[in-house]
Amino acid sequence: MENSESFRNYITKYLIIIILFYFLCRLLYLATHISINIPPDEITHFGISKIFSKTIFLPKDSIESYEFGLISHVPTLYYCLMGKWLNLNFFDISELIFLRMGNVIITFIMALYGLRWIKLVTSNRISILLFMILLTNTPMLSFLGASVSYDNLTNLFAVTTLFYFHIYFVNHKTSDLLSGYISFLGGTLTKKSFLPLAFIYFLIFLFHERKRIKEMLVQFKGIFAGNQIKEKFLFVILIIFLICNLTLYLGNLIKFKKIIPDRTQIMTEEQAMQNSTYTLYRIVYLYKVGKLTLNEAIQTADTIKYDKDRLNALKMLKIAEADKVKKIKILNRFQYARVWMRSMLKGIIGIEGHIAMRKTGLLYYSYAIIFIVAFINFIIFFKNNNNFYLKDAVIISGLYGIVLMQFVNYPIYEYNLSLSAALQGRYLFPVIVPFYAIMSNYFTDNFKNNLAIPILICISVIFIYGDFPFFIKNISIFDSIPSR
């Protein structure tokens, strides 16, 4: 019996190594074979990273940066790191490929932390294997992970915050507490959309540690007593990140009355209009309030540099024109939720960039059935689950999803009347790890092995085929590359 258990552990270990190695190989392939014109906003992230590589300190908005939007008074930790990483390119490698390699490292570390966290959650080998297959075979996550994007660092900080907070709740080690809050503050210095997730994490932390506030203060005081070099180093990083956050967000509130200022509070309208995304929404706004006629708006839209932004501007102008002729009926929040979930699923299991590679037909419905059955399993078994890690996972992924859907995406839809405006599956990736943990647990933990193993195999076949083999089979879609 003991030999049998040891053999199963051995097999599980090497299957996980194979899963991770396959994931790394795919990331490297994507990083070296995809045009810069395809991944979402990669030209912008690449351009800003190059600007940051030229300065020791934070650069200011300038002629060189206007086309990329604001680079000051916004979270810039990712660009600082990528700028410094770019300065390490002593090899005969293009700057783009070298930056992508940095993002591959970030994404791979995210997967490793996902593995470390799921091992806290469960000891069920089948559940762990299913979780790793889901995480490493999500098409948009793989594609984004091999691109230059601040979303990769945001996703990493989301996972490391979760891991270090959860392990701290168990062992109460000072180094884990410090690492958790460094990740927490690192996320808010990377992307402003991390703020609602940070608030959710903070509430969960307070709930679990509400009776240990005094002990935590003693832990902090104890950092400077004795020879705790690691803890002192982590504490210094924590203080630096805290000061940077206060300087950014509190400084913006004092100076601009907003945590992130409008572009025109920093630069002129003419300078702001050099950024195609700003121009897109500005043209539509000016047409809606009557400051531009439809012909003037279309003529201005035709000057937008990038194809996708130009087409989006024309599409939104067409919707705005139709709304002026006859008021378009707006979906209520419940109706919108159904559309939102379907769009998010398509954006996660497909590839959404400046060209889309979407799942359709039987393959799409196979994915949809998996997610629907996972939700049904969750409804059936959640009541009997006493795993606090999974309960936290439900709160984190559920609350973040609601905030994104109802307080970010719905107001954008309500104003622009476009169901596709700012609707990207990748915006859910900061909570993809807790979400997949819920899925893998409720698909396997509640069934005996003679049923759990076939479930693992069936889901694995769909996810593995739907990622890289499907990508290679349909790669000709990317032959028609837009000018962005």
Image: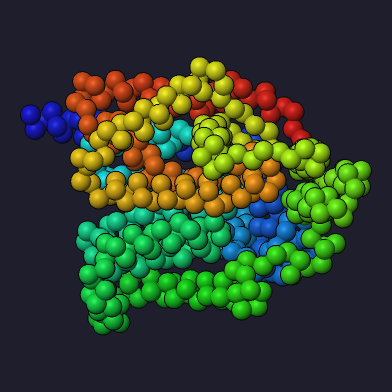
- In this view, 99 is above or below 202: above
Question: Is residue 37 rendered to the left or right of residue 161?
Answer: right
Q: Residue furthest left?
A: 1
How is this picture coloured? Answer: rainbow
Question: Residue 192 placed where, x, y %?
Answer: 56, 60
- In this view, 116 is above or below 20: below
Question: Is residue 137 rendered to the left or right of residue 411?
Answer: left
Residue at (47% x, 46% y) in the render: 401
Residue at (26% x, 46% y) in the render: 121
Number of numbered callouts drawn: 0
Residue 74 vs residue 47, the one in the foreground: 74
The N terminus, quarter of image: top left
Residue 468 vs residue 367, the one in the foreground: 367
Residue 471 vs residue 242, the one in the foreground: 242
The C terminus, quarter of image: top right
Residue 55 seen? no
Determine which quarter of the picture holds residue 58: bottom right
Residue at (80% x, 50% y) in the render: 288
Residue at (71% x, 38% y) in the render: 328
Question: Residue 294 placed where, x, y %?
Answer: 88, 44
Determine which quarter of the picture holds residue 143: top right
Question: Residue 138 placed where, x, y %?
Answer: 48, 34
